[in-house]
Amino acid sequence: MAKKSTPLAKTISRRSFFQKIGGFIANHWLLSSVPVAGAGVLGWAEFDTLSLKLQKWDLSYPNLPLALEGKTICQLSDLHLESLRISPENIRQSVMTQKPDLLVITGDIISTRTDLDKLAPYLSGLTAPFGNYVVMGNNDYSHLSRTLLKRYLQEFETLGWIPLLNDAAFLKQLNLWVIGIDDPATAHDEVDLAYQKVLSAQSTLTNSPFRLALAHSSDCLDDVAKHGADLLLTGHTHGGQIRLPGFGPLITNTYLGDLGFYEGYHVINGVPLYINTGIGESMIPLRFNVPPEIAFFTLHRGNEQPKHETR
């Protein structure tokens, strides 16, 4: 069930975020008055930045298609390969030892054209029997011309990943729709278009397929709720990336994040939603109190409450 959270008092801009972080580093007694403690805090941040966590979820649905019983979806998000220090081998081993049936990435893989050649080392060894799917994030669009974006998408296909830009793919063996919504943060999302094939096929499918929706940001939730989804996987927030002990995140960059929903599993407007804290970092090459994660969702038929463990 969705966690009840008090709305944040105000939205914090990037400028005020860096002012606050700068002030914290300059003035907080842990860092400025006690050098040993300051080194400890930086060591903690370094540890959090490199300590990849596996978030494992068991989700139950009364009408789950029988073909999906026990199947596992693996979600990666926000790799930010421009600054990522977690090795391709670490990510590959973390994913493949769990033997996922379906692999998805929910955006922000690279930020600049110089990062195009980093795709192969990280993605080429990741495979799943029912396919690999990817949607774009705001950083994927930030510094690429239309020509380079085309090359970028072709590189995914060469590596065995299927980009879904406001499009959907039906996996008949699983009775599953994978619905890819283009980046909401840069207004590339067209949810009606993403659902077009799904809605057109409704009259021809005798059994109700599972609807797995993918988007970089949860800001498309209202339109997704209008069409319906059994699971919406997103990222973008980084869980705040830097969270001082005893405080919430200073930046989440999403509407729901401002209301307190910036990571984890929630049910909002009837849509089961997961907000992945991501693997990489943006702007500041450190995480603090928000370790990187890869999420796994194993589906079951039944009425059990969601079960979760971290490894």
Image (spheres, rainbow, N blue to C red):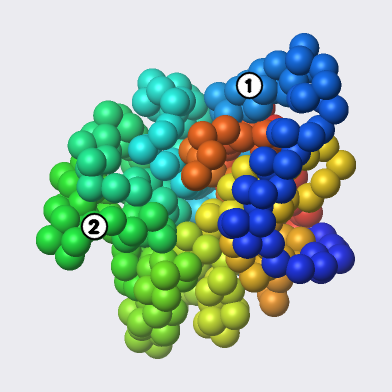
Image location (x, y in percent) of residue 289: 71, 34
Image location (x, y in percent) of residue 169: 33, 65
Locate the C terminus by quadrant.
Answer: top right
Front residue of 170 and 117: 117
- Residue at 23 percent across and 41 percent down: it is 114
Residue 167 in the figure: left or right of residue 87: left
Q: Amino acid at mark 2?
A: Leu
Locate the N terminus by quadrant.
Answer: bottom right
Q: Vertically, is 236 above or below 125?
A: below
According to the picture, the residue beneath numbered tag 1 turns out to be: 47
The numbered disc on residue 86 is none
Residue 185 in the figure: left or right of residue 169: right
Image location (x, y in percent) of residue 21: 68, 42
CA gap, disc 2 to disc 1?
32 Å
Front residue of 102 and 292: 292
- Judge whether residue 298 can be spotted in this image: no
- Residue at 34 percent across and 41 percent down: it is 129
SS under mark 1: helix
- Residue at 45 percent across and 54 percent down: it is 106
Q: Residues within 10 Å of mark 1 (few under 14, many from 20)?
A: some
Q: Amino acid at mark 1?
A: Phe
SS under mark 2: loop
| Disc nearer the start of the sequence (2/1) | 1
Q: Residues within 10 Å of mark 2 (few under 14, many from 20)?
A: some
According to the picture, the residue beneath numbered tag 2 turns out to be: 144
- Judge whether residue 305 can be spotted in this image: yes
Q: Vertically, is 58 above or below 183?
A: above
- Residue at 73 percent across and 33 percent down: it is 26
Image quarter of residue 273: bottom right
